[in-house]
Amino acid sequence: MKKALVTGASRGIGEAVARALAKAGFKVYVNYLNSEEKAFAIANEIGGLAVKADVSDLEQVRSMFDETGDINVLVCNAGISEYGLFLDTSPEKWRRIFAVNTDGAYNCMRCALPSMIHAKSGSIITISSVWGICGASCETAYSASKAALIGLTKALAKEVGPSGIRVNCIAPGVIETDMMALFTEEDRAALREQTPLCRLGTPVDVAELAAFLASDKSGFITGQVFGVDGGFGI
Ligand code: NAP
């Protein structure tokens, strides 16, 4: 049975990706940091395993991979956002956002790649954001960390393609999850209005594409950035 690790799978987009991969036949490792109960419940439901690690910490990530063993699919989804003016973004806030959103992917890729290279196959999916492409006012650290993920995806795809490993990126638009909790109904209405498909996205919208990119059906696709945003980023 093929194995997949989804980071930040205790809620939101990561949870939906974990469920979609399990449905597609993968044994799924559900990574979490704080939402332990939820992670165990999801893992239990989908026949997977919950694995704790702060993805920003390479030692914790190494221990997590000791638990998972070799994996076939890695989804770098764990992420945090912060809203505020650039000049109010302290060096600590800036570092933490990069540590989770960008270093987190680097740490997991480092641990996943040796066995993928040995097996000459694997699929890595990064979850960036439309803001990593367009840039969002008052979300400079977040936008920069997500743009870095896009660069990482493309560069790594070129490097490990000859080893049979594909690396792709999903750039979601506005998706209804806890990350949107700060937004008022008025904000949501404005966002819907700016979206050509006239609605906000759901975690399942993102998960469907992730399952395709994890599968052999996408065998000739690598280094790409896919918007799942209802046209928001056009
Ligand atoms: P969410 O509902 O806030 O969930 C975040 C997930 O990340 C949780 O499972 C959380 O785990 C985990 N996490 C946070 N910090 C972590 C760390 N240091 N180590 C391990 N896990 C950590 O967020 P979401 O909306 O589903 O977002 C998922 C991804 O999609 C993020 O990368 C986000 O930037 C991206 N995205 C979201 C949107 C959107 O509109 N929602 C749009 C574009 C991109 P615990 O709860 O266990 O701590």
Image (spheres, rainbow, N blue to C red):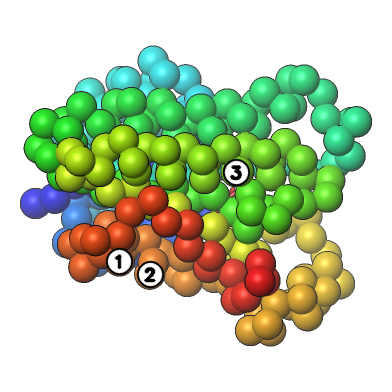
Spot the residue most to the top.
59
Callout in the foreground (1, 2): 1
Q: How far is disc 1 from disc 3 in space, using C-alphas?
A: 22 Å
Instruction: Give the quadrant of residue 139.
Output: top right
Secondary structure category for the residue under label 1: helix
Kindly indicate the quadrant of the structure image that contains residue 106.
top left
Q: Earlier in the sequence, mark 2 or mark 3?
A: 3
Residue contact between numbered discs 1 and 2, judged by CB atoms under 8 Å: yes
Instruction: Find the distance from the CA under tag 2 to the CA under tag 3.
Output: 21 Å
1 and 3 marks in contact (CB < 8 Å):
no
Report crowding for label 3: few under 14, some 14 to 19, many 20 or more residues within 10 A (C-alpha): many
Judging depth in this view, the residue of 18 and 140 nearest the camera is 140
**Which amino acid, by three-letter code, is at mark 1?**
Phe
Q: Residue at x 66, y 67 (%)?
A: 233
Label 3 lies in ligand 1 vicinity (Cβ under 8 Å) = yes
Q: Which residue shows up at 57% across the image and 38% down it?
A: 148
Residue occupying image coordinates x 37% and y 31%: 108
Q: Residue at x 63, y 84 (%)?
A: 197
Measured as percent of width and height from the top left, residue 181 is found at: 72, 56
**How many numbered circles does the render carry?**
3
Q: Which residue is mark 3?
A: 146
Q: Is residue 119 left or right of residue 19?
A: left
The disc at residue 212 is: 1
Callout 1: CB less than 8 Å from ligand 1: no
Q: CA distance from mark 1 to mark 2?
A: 6 Å
Q: Please name the residue that numbered disc 2 is placed on.
A: 208
